[in-house]
Amino acid sequence: MRKKQLYIASQLIGWSVYFLIALFLNQSAGVPIDGIIIVAHLTPFFLGILLSHAYREIIIRNNWLQLSIIKLIPRFVIGSLIMASVFELLFVGVMQLIQMIIGSDILVIDIIQDMVSWTILFILWSVIYFFYHFFKNYKAEEIKNLRWEATKNETELNKLKSQLNPHFMFNSMNTIRALIDENPKKAKLAVTQLSNILRSNLLMGQQKLIPLEKEIKLVRDYLAVESYRYEERLSYNIDVHPESKGIMVPPLMIQTLVENGIKHGISKLPLGGEINLSTSVTDNELEIKIMNSGQYNSNAVSKSGFGIANTRERLKILYGSNAEMSIKNYNGNQVLTEVYLPKSQENEVKDNNR
């Protein structure tokens, strides 16, 4: 319903309720409902609509809705008193005509009682009117803040992605450069695989989440390129649970963690090592495990790169407290990286990539 229609409907309903309550109270007091009584109660109905509308115009033109509560309270109290006074003057004029017809006088006590009643009535009208607008403004501000937070998160996420892409390209190009002199055929194949990676990377960069299956394909290509560099010093195994393939994950997240395992673990070992990637699914979560040879030193990792911190920040932005990530030493000569993500299927989160 549009604002104008809502306002008109509220006015008619509110003053109609007042009219019906007044008739009911008269009937309960034993006053017979005749034409004079109905006219006497219809008068406040029409005056109420007319004067409250005029009061609303004063509020809007003087920007009272933009004022603080402290500045607003005296204005709407005084405004209600003025409106009640005008209301009473007009009402007394109409009632004077009615009293002349029925041959009775208006008592001063009745005027005082009516004045108090109209003042309370206009204060009540003001409270309802201002409460509605304060609530509406509060909701609008809340929506504005949520949009700002979403924009901020989107900007931060894009910033993190832009940091990650050059990092990945730098290491991959170093691998190919080392292969050119050693084995041109492998270098050519590596260039083809890298082009596939970069193509996927460009497409993934436009998305918040992608199916795990696509991320695993990227990881396979990445490990193939790295295996040309490390040769027999790098062996790997990937075991993906069939049910996990359609679950959505942040693009390049697993690739970053695999790269971290090679860079900070296997590359530092004279004989190299092994990296194993596996996924499993529970009722509510996707579990990703990466096990690589080496030793985890959090201080050394934080000083030499931003991959882990980057991944943690992305998970925080995308999932809040619903995602977990841990890295720890395992069995003395291995590093275990575990990531737990909420289980969202591709068709359930398609709006995330818009």
Image (cartoon, grey):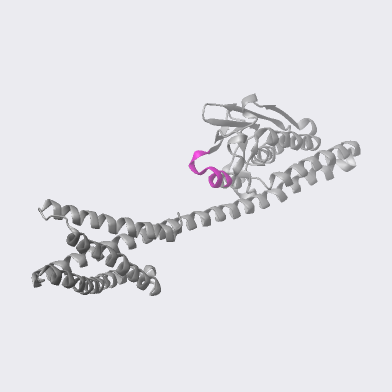
Q: Quadrant of residue 49?
A: bottom left
Q: Left or right of 215: which side holds 86?
A: left
Identify whether 94 is placed above or below 281: below
Q: Indicate the position of residue 273 as horizontal and vertical percent values.
A: 70, 31
Q: Indicate the position of residue 315 as horizontal and vertical percent values.
A: 56, 43
x 84%, y 39%: residue: 192
Q: Which is the main secondary structure of the residues drawn in magenta?
A: helix
Q: Left or right of 281: which side holds 118?
A: left
Does the segment drawn in magenta span residue 318?
A: yes
Q: Indicate the position of residue 78 as horizontal and vertical percent values.
A: 25, 73
Q: Left or right of 184: which side holds 83?
A: left
Identify whether 336 is placed above or below 139: above
Does the segment drawn in magenta span residue 145?
A: no
Q: Indicate the position of residue 244 as horizontal and vertical percent values.
A: 62, 28
x 65%, y 32%: residue: 292
Q: Left or right of 145: which side holds 305?
A: right
Question: What stretch of residues is rendered in magenta?
Answer: 314-323
x 75%, y 45%: residue: 171
